Image (cartoon, rainbow, N blue to C red):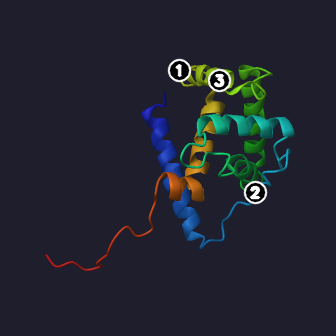
Amino acid sequence: MQTRREILQGLIVSVGGASMLAACGGMAKVTPTNSSAARGRLFSQREMALVSRISDLLIPRTETPGAIDADVPGFLDGFMVEWANAATRQFMHTVLTDIEEALGPDFVTANSTDAERTLREFDGRAFESGSPHVGYRNLKGLITQAYFASKEGALLERKWVANPGRWDPCVER
């Protein structure tokens, strides 16, 4: 479970990041990696498969599109290439290696039931106090933020509307 501080930091980054991107006048964009490519621009084929599997298990397709439909893995790969500095990129490689070791070599190819159980158990351990899996918590946050920043996540899942009703700039008291 996330601490209050981690939740607030995530919200601040989300709101601040959205404000900063809006201030750029639409110039700040991330070009997602082609989702049909097995290898990303930064992520190796193994890393891309791992990010895709985790994304799909965290946000599966239901009556609304899932993380794979929103191309979250491609977005994260593009984000790391275009926005992250060298230290963050290296950290992400280390995080993915640690996650792969913790989940086991068969996680990506395991059937859905086994993979879901394995990820659920790992997720529980990762959010325990003092867990060394901070990188996984960061990745999970990036996956959910990328999904809800996508067209599919924002419009279909959250049903966000730019102007939900009439707006009166001046209201009499």
- Residues at marks 1 and 3, CA–CA distance in whole angstroms: 23 Å
Picture coordinates of residue 50 (x, y %)? 75, 34
Q: Quadrant of residue 83?
A: bottom right
Q: Amino acid at mark 3?
A: Thr
Front position in the image: 12 or 117? 117
| Residue contact between numbered discs 2 and 1, judged by CB atoms under 8 Å | no
Determine if residue 84 is in view.
no
- Secondary structure, mark 2, is helix
- Residues at marks 2 and 3, CA–CA distance in whole angstroms: 35 Å
Mark 2 or 3, nearer chain start: 2
Q: Quadrant of residue 98?
A: top right
> Could you tell me which residue is drawn at 68 percent across and 27 percent down?
112
Report the residue marked by disc 3. 113
Front position in the image: 54 or 170? 54
Picture coordinates of residue 56 (x, y %)? 66, 38
Quadrant for the C terminus in the image: bottom left
> Could you tell me which residue is drawn at 65 percent across and 52 percent down?
70
Report the residue marked by disc 1. 128
Q: Quadrant of residue 135?
A: top right
Front position in the image: 116 or 15? 116
Mark 1 or 3, nearer chain start: 3
| Residue contact between numbered discs 1 and 3, judged by CB atoms under 8 Å | no
Report the residue marked by disc 2. 82
Q: Amino acid at mark 2?
A: Glu
Mark 2 or 1, nearer chain start: 2
- Residues at marks 2 and 1, CA–CA distance in whole angstroms: 32 Å
Picture coordinates of residue 111 (x, y %)? 72, 25
